[in-house]
Amino acid sequence: SAVISQKPSRDICQRGTSLTIQCQVDSQVTMMFWYRQQPGQSLTLIATANQGSEATYESGFVIDKFPISRPNLTFSTLTVSNMSPEDSSIYLCSVEGTTSGRTDTQYFGPGTRLTVL
Amino acid sequence: DAKTTQPPSMDCAEGRAANLPCNHSTISGNEYVYWYRQIHSQGPQYIIHGLKNNETNEMASLIITEDRKSSTLILPHATLRDTAVYYCIVRVATGNQFYFGTGTSLTVIP
């Protein structure tokens, strides 16, 4: 399967600041997604990162708060802007359509654990 | 996408088979049943998926009922490392997002 890395693995941030999370894949993929997992909760999709165009956001998530970039087929970033303690979560990148694994399923990165004070 | 229902928690003795049920009574004809697991807040790990036939791989077996309204994930010889939250998800084959429910927290007991 695809090897997915995320940076940073964890961070502690002050409220009002922003953090950019990077997702790097070892092979080209068709689709990339960003999820959030709040403490004790299941995963919630934030958006689909589209290569060369604006991301597609799920209900309840907006571009001003979670800007996403996807400059090529192996890399994406998610920024959590103007953070508050409610943004404390694990943020996960996932990919689909990789040539190094099944093309009909998603593979997940290790996640970025964010704590906002 | 169709919804799924899973028991919130289960225990299994080490070395025994773990049978995790999932109900998906509103599944559509073109939707697959996927299983993932998440170990201690790591990224979810793909286990197996199927459409209507039973499937087996090196990790598990997936049994889907003939009417496709329910399925069972079978871990044939559970180990302590299988302790995790297991998610059952239904989705069309490609390109759509996965909607994660609350899953089943499986605890393998020594």
Image (cartoon, coloured by chain):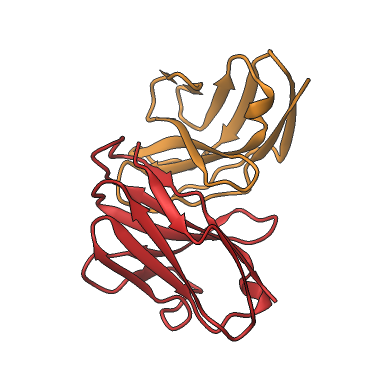
Chain colours: A red, B orange
Residue A25 position in % (x across, y down): 33, 50
Q: Is residue B3 above or below residue B64?
A: below
Q: Is residue A47 above or below residue B50?
A: below
Quadrant including the C terminus of chain B? top right
Image check: B14 left or right of B51?
right
Residue extending furthest toward the right: B110
Image check: B87 left or right of B67?
right
Q: Is residue B3 above or below residue B65?
A: below
| Viewer-closest of A11 and B105 | A11
Quadrant of the rendered image containing residue B92: top left
| Viewer-closest of A7 and A39 | A7
Image check: A37 left or right of B50?
right
Residue pictured at 62% horizontal, 14% vertical: B77
Residue B81 position in % (x across, y down): 64, 28
Residue pictured at 68% horizontal, 13% vertical: B15
Image check: A117 left or right of A102?
right
Residue B43 position in % (x across, y down): 52, 47
How many numbered marks does the figure carry?
0
Residue A5 position in % (x across, y down): 42, 51
